[in-house]
Image (cartoon, rainbow, N blue to C red):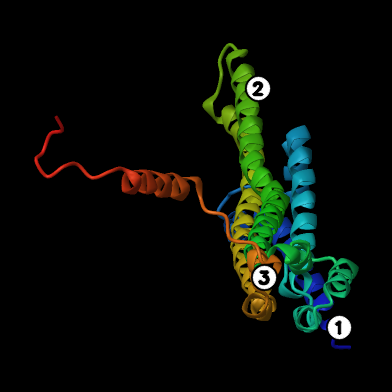
Amino acid sequence: MDRMKPLLKIVWIGLVLCAVLLTTPLLCLAADDSADATGAGIAKVDFRQLVDDAGTIGIIIAVLSVAMVALIVEHIISIRSNSLMPPGMAEEVHSLIAQQQYRSADSVCKSRPSFLSYILSAGLAEVQMGYGAVEKAMEDAAMQQSARLNRKIEYLSVIGTLSPMLGLLGTVWGMILAFSEFTAKANPDVAELAPGISKALITTLFGLSVTVPALASFAFFRNRIDELVAQSSLLAEHVFADFKRSVPSPAKQTGKPVRKRPEDELAERIANQQASRPAPPPGGQQS
């Protein structure tokens, strides 16, 4: 029963997002409906008529809204602490590393694929090279997986950018049609232009209704990824903490001297040459 609670919570969040997305245009027109109910003379707006007037561009925006809801539900399921950092994995791998059972630890990571397991597996592949190589491998793996997660949520940003542009495209096209009909008449009436403009603005309304939740969700998941990546990287360092203190560097393990940098070797060579030169006579210049 406890395992079903997170899933039910995710389902409820998805249903709420769908309800908000579908009712946003209705809420925007609530003032017009209430004015009509009081007899103010404003025509009542039918939501089905709005969908029909939106045309092909409205259908495209509706498809983008469905894709947005699906992406949000998927990200809520996949981008969470238990998915990126499975409970118990860090303790199990830490125990195996303390026992120097590196292959078993790597098998545990590969059997439970996740963000943390990928980082730990990359570090375990470099245990023979010392902690410096392990730390570098984990940093590279964390950067790679973080970039993958950020690319995953980029689709929300794309939807949030395209929706208002499509809405504006539909509005411009509707305005062109409205003015074309207006100029075709010999004695045009300004009141006849209002219905065409009203229909033209419907796609902008639909586009903005999709843009607001899409960009808000993108910002939320981006911050969540940054937080979880930082937590996973810190947890991976704690897993290798005992390894860092107990395992010496590769030079100490093999008994070989640590190789000096080329700059240090050149400076030492110049110092030896200057020390091997004979000292000048006390009189100053040589005869």
Left or right: 75, with 272 as reference point: right
Residue type, label 2: Leu
Figure check: 264 above or below 119 = above
Figure check: 242 above or below 197 = below
Q: Residue 284 sits in which quadrant?
A: top left
User: In front of the other: label 2 or label 1?
Assistant: 1
Q: Earlier in the sequence, mark 3 or mark 2?
A: 2
Figure check: 20 above or below 94 = above
**Does the rendering let one see residue 141?**
yes
User: In front of the other: label 3 or label 2?
Assistant: 3
Which mark, by number, is residue 177?
Answer: 2
Q: For the residue labelled by badge 2, is the local secondary structure a helix, a strand or a loop?
A: helix
Left or right: 64, with 282 as reference point: right
Q: Are marks 3 and 2 in contact (CB under 8 Å)?
A: no
Whole-angstrom CA distance, mark 2 to mark 1, is 56 Å
* Label 2 crowd bin: few (<14), some (14–19), many (20+), radius 10 Å: some
Q: Earlier in the sequence, mark 1 or mark 3?
A: 1
